[in-house]
């Protein structure tokens, strides 16, 4: 009595020996290299896309940083700036007219609020 | 009716493009800063200067206007201006006049001798010859603290106008003022009816007034358009809490009515 495994082995043994064509190995190697090339190209393209997304906006911001202007002043909008100028004019007039510290205090308080800064102790 | 004209001080009317100045340049160095002359002929320095206290080191710069000429010149709060275009500000009773004269006669250039951190420095600049970029508008309007305030409907109560543009000596206390068009800075004091407060709140308000006085007054900046009248008042919260009275947040100055009205 023979087992299925023995029968299968017998059949395999009975099969004729086939020699693979000599070009087969070359074809397999070529296909493998081609697949690698495609993968590499895809990775490079993805890296380029990521680089563009990350770098281009930064490059576009660069000229804004280089814009000449008031480097030492925090950016405040035009309306607020106009208010600060008006306040400074009023402050200067108050000092010229010899106003008291108490009279001047509300002007300094308003200026500090506009600029979001604490009131300078020496100001009042 | 009071007329408030623009006060020709050494101040503002910021404007033309400037480039930063070297802070330690000798007086002979070519001017590096571009300044502009103000519309009324006075030169606008873009700084708040304490003219009330003068000593041998001149006058103190209390603040520098953001984007103004003083800032572009390199002036800083805390600097002491000793001389302007060679005219000394020390040992004079009227440093503001001296500075104004020096600036108005500055011609093509301006040189400030200052003391910063105990060291003498020179800041200099040249007029750029361009017109000023002033926020001055032609024409005039009116500010009024009068009228029938909408107490019940909008919680707005009367105020007294104490100063306009830093001038505390208003010629007429009529509550109706003619002002130049443009941004006007008002300091006002609330006159909220006593019955709006609780008994304790009323006492607390009196206590705060006694303690802080004029420091409780508030600023209202009105952008006055020509031929327009602005009615100002104090808008309050309802009800008025004691904590709001203590931190002076129970009212805000407001323009409660604007009316087209001819002004000459």
Image: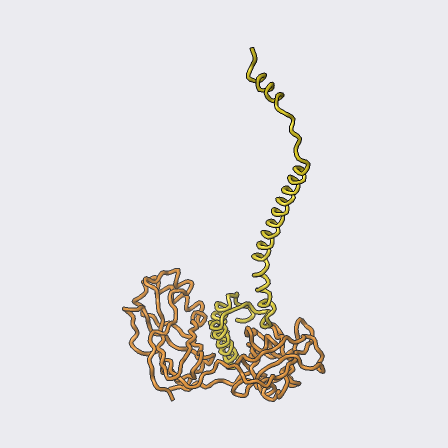
Chain colours: A yellow, B orange
- For the point 56% across and 57% down, which residue is it? A53
Q: Is residue B77 left or right of residue B174?
A: right
Position in image of residue B146 (x %, y %): 33, 79
Q: Residue B90, percent across and down?
A: 63, 82
Camera-side residue: B252 or A50? A50
Could you tell whether B196 is left or right of B183 in the image? left
Question: Quadrant of the rendered structure where residue B173 is?
Answer: bottom left
| Residue B132: percent from left, percent from top | 54, 83
Q: Identify the residue at image location x=43%, y=71%.
A: B218
Q: Residue at x 29, y 70 (%)?
A: B151
Q: Quadrant of the C terminus of chain B?
A: bottom left
Q: Is residue A54 left or right of residue B115?
A: left
With respect to residue B47, does B263 lie above or below? below
Q: How many marks?
A: 0
Q: Is residue A99 above or below residue A4?
A: below
Q: Position of residue B7 (x, y in %)?
A: 49, 85
Q: Nearer the viewer, residue A91 or B141?
A: B141
């Amino acid at each position: 009595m023979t087992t299925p495994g023995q029968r299968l082995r017998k059949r395999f043994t009975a099969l004729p020996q086939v020699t693979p064509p000599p070009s087969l190995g070359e074809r397999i190697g070529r296909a493998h290299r081609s697949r690698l090339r495609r993968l590499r190209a895809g990775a490079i393209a993805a890296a380029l896309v990521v680089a563009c997304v990350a770098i281009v906006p930064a490059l576009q911001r660069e000229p804004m940083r280089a814009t000449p202007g008031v480097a030492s002043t925090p950016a405040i909008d035009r309306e607020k700036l106009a208010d600060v100028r008006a306040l400074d004019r009023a402050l200067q007039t108050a000092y010229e007219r010899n106003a008291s510290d108490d009279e001047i205090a509300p002007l300094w308080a308003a200026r500090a609020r506009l600029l979001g800064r604490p009131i300078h102790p020496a100001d009042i | 009716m009071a007329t408030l004209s623009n006060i020709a001080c050494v101040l503002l009317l910021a404007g033309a493009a400037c480039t930063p100045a070297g802070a330690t340049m000798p007086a002979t160095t070519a001017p590096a800063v571009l300044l502009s002359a103000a519309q009324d002929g006075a030169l606008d320095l873009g700084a708040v200067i304490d003219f009330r206290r003068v000593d041998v080191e001149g006058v103190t710069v209390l603040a520098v206007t953001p984007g103004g000429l003083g800032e572009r010149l390199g002036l800083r709060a805390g600097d002491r201006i000793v001389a302007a275009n060679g005219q000394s500000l020390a040992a004079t009773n009227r440093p503001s006049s001296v500075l104004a004269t020096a600036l108005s006669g500055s011609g093509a250039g301006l040189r400030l001798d200052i003391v910063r951190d105990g060291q003498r420095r020179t800041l200099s600049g040249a007029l750029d010859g361009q017109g000023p970029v002033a926020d001055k508008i032609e024409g005039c309007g009116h500010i009024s603290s009068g009228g029938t305030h909408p107490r019940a409907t909008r919680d707005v109560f009367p105020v007294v106008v104490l100063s306009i543009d830093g001038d505390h000596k208003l010629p007429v206390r009529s509550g109706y003022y003619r002002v130049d068009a443009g941004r006007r800075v008002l300091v006002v004091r609330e006159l909220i009816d006593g019955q709006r407060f609780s008994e304790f709140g009323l006492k607390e308000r009196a206590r705060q007034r006694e303690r802080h006085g004029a420091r409780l007054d508030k600023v209202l900046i009105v952008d006055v358009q020509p031929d327009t009248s602005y009615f100002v008042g104090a808008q309050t919260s309802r009800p008025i809490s004691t904590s709001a009275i203590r931190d002076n947040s129970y009212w805000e100055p407001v323009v409660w009515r604007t009316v087209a009205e001819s002004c000459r």
